Every structure is written in structure tokens, then in C-alpha cells.
Image (spheres, rainbow, N blue to C red):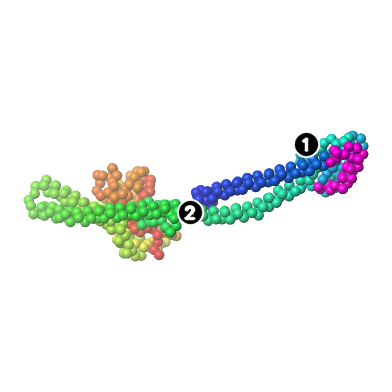
Amino acid sequence: MILRNIRSTPLRLTIMLMAIFIMSSAASFTAAYLVIKSSFDTALADEIDLKFATYQAIENQGDLLERLLLDSRSANPELLILQYRPDEGAPIANVMRIPPRNAFGVIPESAIDHADQSIADSYLARSARVGQGQLTIAQTREQIVNMGEIMLSVVMIGLLPALFAAAVFGVFVAGRAKAKIGDVQRTLAALTGGDMSARVPTGKESNDLSDIGHAVNKMAASQDALMVSMRQISTDIAHDLKTPIQRVAVLVDQIVERTNLSDEQARLLHQASAEVDRIDKTFQALLQLAQIEGGAVRDRFATTDLKQITTDMVEFLDAEAEDQGYVIGQQLVGAGPFTINGDRHLLSQVVANLIQNALRHTPKGSRIDVALTTTASHVILSVADNGPGIPKGETEKVLRRLYRMEKSRTTQGNGLGLSLVAAICALHEAKLELLDNAPGLRVKITFNPAT
């Protein structure tokens, strides 16, 4: 979940902007600290130089020693350290020992031998020749250290709450942006799945994400209108051609019954009658598809026992299958109930179409297994055979209207059986899967149980 959130573009932009803010703030505070520190160091160096000038102005060695002895006794080691090592005689200092520095440099507390005396954490020190000896003066850097701590406190007190507020606000804004992007993604997924009524929720806001939402809705409305137009055209064609086709069928029957025909003429007319009947069934299926896809039959939904429907259809087709050399088996898995919300006639057609599809596309002697399974949350219908199955790459195509695989073109059918099954499953909000039965095909339909 965390990794998925980090992949969100709005959240990544928020993190990036916060990182830039942190780095720029850190750079600003660091630059300010270095400038102030340099100013303090310069002031300390000037103060030390002034002290050196004061001692160098004393020409008499005795007076110098007396002045240094007096100053070392009065100086607080936490603020100022004096050490003078004359060429002859005992050293003068207010600490045990401090290392000499020929140039200005920082001396830490650890480098100073101070016994039990209280001293500062660090000093700015310099050593030089004064009179007849080596003088070291070290001035405390406590104010610089304190200044650094104060600036750090400013960062902690001022910057961190600002960062926290920015982070909360950024995550909030990123969450809203992600939610809008999620709305667009879900709408596109629904449109891809065939739900042409899906739309992106849009408000009165005016921003780039809202513009994208409006554009998606405009595209969806255009596609929906196109689909409705295409369905209406196919429905109108089917309606307009249905009556002439039925008239042709009647005329062919009348020719056969009322005229004396040779055997060849009768055979050809019987073939013509069969073709007209097949065309009529195709248009009937197209009209039914249009009706199902329009959702007009949803008001007929009722609590339906899928077990009873399956049993009836297996018994109805078993005799025909047995005459052709096929075996149909039925299996129930689970205690039930096997009830769902749906239209009994359409669900019966699903079971019949799947069994007839298996009979049509498998060799004689094949076995067809019809199974019903109940789980805690679903009712599953499956129809499996041990025939040649469907090649990879064809599973999506066989659900299209009038599509027939090359090897199926010599068999009976109009290429609408599985299309009708898919449309009925979509109407019932059921999940249709075409699976490899190794060998053969297994059609699995997952329904939501009756509520």
C-alpha cells in the first residue's frame, strides 16, 4: 500500500517540493550561520590582536611579567586563557597548559590541560613572541556555539512545524488529486468493460483534472450515442428484414407443397428453406441481443433456482446428445442454495447454448460436464468438454457477434451463441471466463447469490 501511494504522481510531486523546500531552507540557514560565525570569528581575532598589541607595547620585561601575572589571576578561564612562557623563569598561565598556535586556530577543550578548572568547549587562539617569551591568548567561542544552538532551535521551532503543516496539506491535496485520478481510471475501466453509462464525477472546480474529467465524459457520451445508434441500426435492419424473410420461407413451403417438382428441384428447395430458416434464427438472435443489451428485460428478474434450470436443460438435451454419441454429466458441489436474481428464460438459454455449443464443436463420444458450485459469496456454473478447445488469442474474439473460428465455418451455427451468453452474463452482472480444460474448453460463470 505504501509503495503504491508513493507511485502516485501527486504524492511524488508533494514529496519533491518538500525536499526542495527543506534543501533551500537548510542552505539558507547554513549560509546565514556561516556568515554570522565568520563575523564572530573576525571580531574575536580582532580582540585577540588588540590584547597582543597591548602587551607588545610594554617594553620593560619586568613590567610585562607583572602585567601578565595580574591579568592571568583575574581572567576567567571560561572566557579567556593566558599562557606566557618566558625564555628564563617559570611560566605564567591561568590553566595548566594550552598548546601554542602560531596562527589563529580553534582549540577544543580536550586539547587543554585544565585540571579541575571549568573551561569552555572551544577557543580561538593565537601564539606570538612578546618580550622575552612566547605568549598564547585564547578567547572563548561560547557565543558562536550558543549562536549555532539558537539557530538550530529556530529551525526546530520554526521550520519543522512549517514542514509538518506543508506535509499535511500536501498529502491532503495529493489525496484529492489521487481520488480524482482514481475516478477517471475507474470510469475508463467501466467504459472499457462495456458500461457506456459510466461518467467521471465532476463539480464546479476548474483545474486540469476537472478538464480531463469533462473530456472523458464528453468522449463517453459520444461513444454511448454511437453504440446506441449502431444497436438501433442493427435492430431496425433485423426488424425490416424479418418479415420479408418469413414471407420467403412461406413461399418456399408453398412451392414444395403445391407444385410437382423433380427430386433435384425438391432437394434444392429444401436447402433453400433450411438457409432461410437459419437466416431467420440469426435475425431473431440479433433482435434478442439488442433487447438484452438495452436492459429492457431486467424488470423480469426474480429469485431463480439455477439448480432447477440446469437440471431441466440437461434432461431436455440428454436424449439428443445420447443419440449423437455424447455423454452429459451433472455435478453439484456445495450444500446450496443455488439461487440467484435473474430471468429464468435467459438463464435457461445460457445453459442450453453452452451445452449445444459443446455438442456442435466436439467430436462424437466426447463428454460434457455441467457443474454447479456454491461458495460463501458466489454461485458458479461451469460447462466443460474434452474437445479441441479454443486456441490462444481466440478467446476474446469468439464472444464477438457473428465471429466464427476457421475450423467452425463448416459446422452449423451463426456465431451468436457465445455472444448471447456474454450479453446475458453482463445483464446479470456475472463474470464469464473461457478456460482451458486440458484438453477442451471450460466455460465458467460466476454469479452473485440471491439477496
| Residue in the picture at 80% in, 41% down | 50
| Position of 39 relative to 214 (above/below) | above
User: Mark 2 or mark 1, which is nearer to you?
Assistant: 1
Q: Determine which quarter of the picture holds residue 264.
A: top left
- Which residue corresponds to mark 1? 103
* Relative side of 244 to 419, left or right: left
Q: Nearer the viewer, residue 329 or 334?
A: 334
Q: Earlier in the sequence, mark 2 or mark 1?
A: 1
Whether residues under marks 2 and 1 lie with C-beta atoms below 8 angstroms apart, the answer is: no
Number of marks drawn = 2
Q: Tag 2's secondary structure?
A: helix
Q: Amino acid at mark 2?
A: Ala
Q: Determine which quarter of the picture holds residue 372.
A: bottom left
Judge whether residue 329 can be spotted in this image: no
* Range of magenta residues: 54-79
Instruction: Check if residue 74 falls in the magenta segment.
Output: yes
Q: Amino acid at mark 1?
A: Ala
**Residue 108 x, y percent position in the rendering:** 77, 43
Dot 2 crowding, Cα within 10 Å, few <14, some 14–19, many 20+: some
| Residue in the picture at 11% in, 47% down | 265
| Residue in the picture at 89% in, 37% down | 59
- Which residue corresponds to mark 2? 177
Instruction: Check if residue 341 falls in the magenta segment.
Output: no
| Residue in the picture at 54% in, 53% down | 170
Judge whether residue 300 can be spotted in this image: yes
**Residue 4 x, y percent position in the rendering:** 51, 50
Q: Tag 1's secondary structure?
A: loop
Assign the magenta stretch its main secondary structure.
helix
